[in-house]
Image: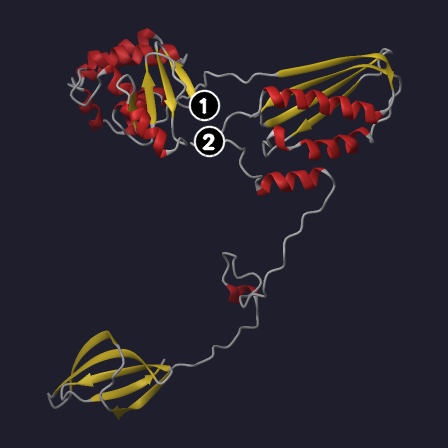
Amino acid sequence: MFALSDEFKDLSPQVMRFRLVWIYDCTGVSNFWKNKIRSEKAVLTEDSAWKLICKFYGIHLFSSLQELENLSKTYFEEFNLKVSPQQQLKVYTQLRRLGLTKVGHLKKIPDDQIQRRWGKDWLNFFRGVLGSPKAVWPWIPHRKIKEFRLKKAFDFGVCDSAILIEESLELLLQLSKEQSQIHLRQIDIFLGSQEEGADFHLPFLFHSSPLLAQSFDWLKKLFILRFSQIELLAPLSQIEIKLLPAEAPRAQQLHLFQTKPAAVSVSEITERLSSLGAKIFQPQGLPSRLPERSWHKVAPKENFKISTPPLYYPLIQHRPKEIPQPRAELYLVEQLVEFEASGEELRRDYFVAFMNGRWRWIFKDQTQKWFQQGLI
């Protein structure tokens, strides 16, 4: 769900500015808050951003091309697409020469013809106003990532790595108290030396975006491991930490009553163990009955000379055996009509039934008698 308002509202962490309005991506918002957003009169809601913009500008299938031309000017100028006003005028002139006067008339032109004549930008724009699911709305986030810089100067030269680790964690702890919902993306530690050319830079990258407030024990072990790998050439005069938070995920779920952070994910635990030098193992599964390369596209018979024989071989009886009327569930296979040389008509209704632990191929003739033709 997407929402639009004239004034900025805190509806979703994903928000962008389009001319004089605000557009919110509420895809990951809970259903409770979605209903709250829909109930606001000053907020428009739709399933996609394209439908939302068309609804705001009053564009529908019966709108004139003049109304669509005004929207296209705004669209191409806002996203800095390489479409000049002269080219826009040329496109709408060609559409009018073709006898197209309404937005809905654009459906008569195939997509490949639009792209070949005017390019991908026009194809995406026409797809959007026509409500095609293939249309992509250029999403430009309004909220930029804010960097946090923490710095501390020492009164005397520091050579002990334990003091550096303690000071680093203390700076991060103060930041977590002020910003409780910071997810880590990158931490850069700069160690300023008293001598020129003896500075150090320690980068830390985090792929699972762990929460800072929950990661101090892990960060302490990680810092001890990294600081033990460097050799200080001179006493340090200051320490500076640059923290780059992770972006809010597009599918972030906003919980109503949850005040505590969510549980630690498996990917985050795996990253923590791997960064500390631990090897990640998976439990060994049960032995499979399939050949080792049965998942390949090549047939298993081409990979192996040895084949596993089936448990049962199909058995066809040349002389059908008369049996009593079966009581099992019957599955009709086919109905056959044959004629003997004498002109006599033979009718057989073939069935498959599971009786006495085997699948049996049986049939019923024109005299309503049952016979067994074979075993499957």
Q: Is residue 153 left or right of residue 129?
A: right
Q: Residue at x 20, y 15 (%)?
A: 65
Image quadrant containing the N terminus? top left
| Residue shown at the point (29%, 24%) measured from the top left | 45
Vertical side of 286 occupied by 46: above or below: above
Residue 270 in the image: above or below residue 287: above
Specify few, some or many for label 2: CA neighbours under 10 Å numbering under 14, 14-19, or 20 or more. Answer: some
At label 1, counting other C-alpha atoms closer than 10 Å, the crowd grade (few under 14, some 14-19, many 20 or more) is: many
**Among numbered discs 1 and 2, the one appearing first in the sequence:** 1
Q: Position of residue 258 (x, y in %)?
A: 48, 33
Query: On the image, numbered disc 2 is attached to which residue?
Result: 252
Q: Which mark is residue 13?
A: 1
Q: Quadrant of the C terminus?
A: bottom left
Q: Which amino acid type corresponds to the residue marked 1 in the rendered image?
A: Pro
Q: Would residue 372 be found to the left or right of residue 14 on screen?
A: left
Q: Is residue 291 left or right of residue 128?
A: right
Give x and y (percent) for residue 203.
71, 25
Regarding residue 226, the answer to whether it shows in the image is yes
Give the structural element (helix, strand or loop) at label 2: loop
The percent coordinates of residue 362 (x first, y second) are: 27, 83
